[in-house]
Amino acid sequence: MTNPEIAILMLGLFIVLVLLGFPIAFTLIAMGVGFGYYAYHQAGSIEVIADAFNNQIFYLLNQNTYSVMENDTLVAIPLFLFMGYVVERANIVNRLFSSLQLAARNLPGSMAIAALITCAVFSTASGIVGAVVTLMGLLAFPAMAKAHYRKDFSAGVICAGGTLGILIPPSIMLIVYAAIAELSPLRLYAAAVFPGFLLASMYIIYVIGRVMLNPGIAPKPVMDDRIRPSEIYLQLLTSFVPLTILIMLVLGSILGGLATPAEAAAMGALGGLVLAVLYRSLTWIKIKESVFLTAKATAMVCWMFVGSWTFASVFSYLGGHDVIEHWVLALELEPWQFLVMVQAIIFLLGWPLEWSEILIIFVPIFLPMLDTFGVNPYFFAMLVALNLQTSFLTPPMAMSAYYLKGVLKNQIELMQIFRGIMPYLSIVIFCMFLMYMFPEIALWFPDYLFGPYIP
């Protein structure tokens, strides 16, 4: 039943309900089932109460649920999550931050640099923004506050660094994107390596430059003169190196074609347990906590998938995708104009929505148009991945700011966090501009590993 007006109403009502605070996953399911019941209803089929469930929407919901559960690509999600939670619960990140803080002691804003590098490394082991921001808020913010760092500066560092998990492999978001767009997760991971570390490097350069211009925002911490360089090297050797080797083995096995993302994630989960044993920090309680958090986060992602796919299917069946596609094509845009428009839309959607809804509901609207405008789908994916960083950094719905406020409570005001993250929002946009001007930033590495992309 093609009815574009109902499709647009469905989309608008969903956004309103999300802004009112309704749970996103179950709102998607309710909207999909409700409007789907209307869309798939056939006149005369409902004659008695017993026929009330004789509607294709229930079959669609069941099939979407089954499709999520049997998707081999999504198997990597709980395994990567478990790896990250084990690393977190085993206090490996605490050791990493402490050693990096000592190693960077002579640089301007040394503690902020240590926090950014720790976020980048932990992001590769976790891939979940909330976990990284929350942990670093508890770990790094008090240390920077004790060193008299300005609160908004410290908050900006943690929020921006915590969002790197969206982009840097093994990003959960890229696994989801691969499943939606039917792209190779290996090539997506390869495409994200340079943009991810470019963005992290730009953050660090900004911190150093900002502190050099205004040393008062990040005073140099007082270090214990009794700490010898050999002790610093030993701390780096025992904290930074093992975790980095584990991450490199996981990514290397994926990019080298030696393992699928799910197999590499299983190896990473096992490696996280081995590291926790070696550090003598693995307990039964911590294992239970890691399993519980993994199950909780995985269930959230899976139900989000079920709801989003059901919503998107009904929205498309009603003609919503066709209306938007015809509208875009009627504008007769140049390829660069198409990219700017799409990224602007995704940027605005990042205010009320999370990355999963944007990916599953809205990105598929534009994917069929890539061939028309001659846009490489992996290049487009990297622009989207960078853009989704802004959804966590853009007030008033900057989720990373609320994650940090949630753990710090009265230690900082929300407006201070917003002020701190604004420079990093500008850096993300500048990084997107650089990648648009030099697409090789995203495309050279996958082309080198797997050969030129052939549609």
Image: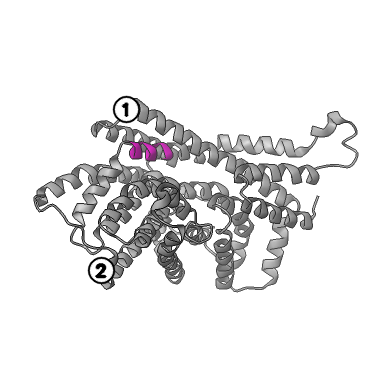
Depth order, front residue of 191/388: 388
State yes or no: residue 86 in magenta.
yes
> Residue 435 sits in which quadrant?
bottom left
Question: Is 25 located above or below residue 336 in the figure?
Answer: above
User: Disc 2 vs disc 1: Cβ atoms closer than 8 Å?
Assistant: no
Q: Position of residue 321 (x, y in %)?
A: 69, 57
Residue visible at 49% across and 39% down in the picture: 297
Mark 2 or 1, nearer chain start: 2
The total of numbered circles placed on residues is 2
Q: Which residues are magenta?
A: 81-89
Residue 220 in view here: yes
Provide the major secondary structure of the magenta segment: helix
Element assignment for label 2: helix
The figure's colour scheme reads one colour
- Does residue 343 appear to the left or right of 410 in the view shown? right
Which residue bears the numbered disc 1? 283
- Answer few, some or many: residues within 10 Å of disc 1's Cα (few below 14, many 20 plus, some between 14 and 19): few
Q: Quadrant of the C terminus?
A: bottom right
- Whether residue 51 is situated above or below residue 108 in the rendered picture: above
Q: Position of residue 117 (x, y in %)?
A: 30, 54
Residue named by callout 2: 215
Is 447 a magenta residue? no
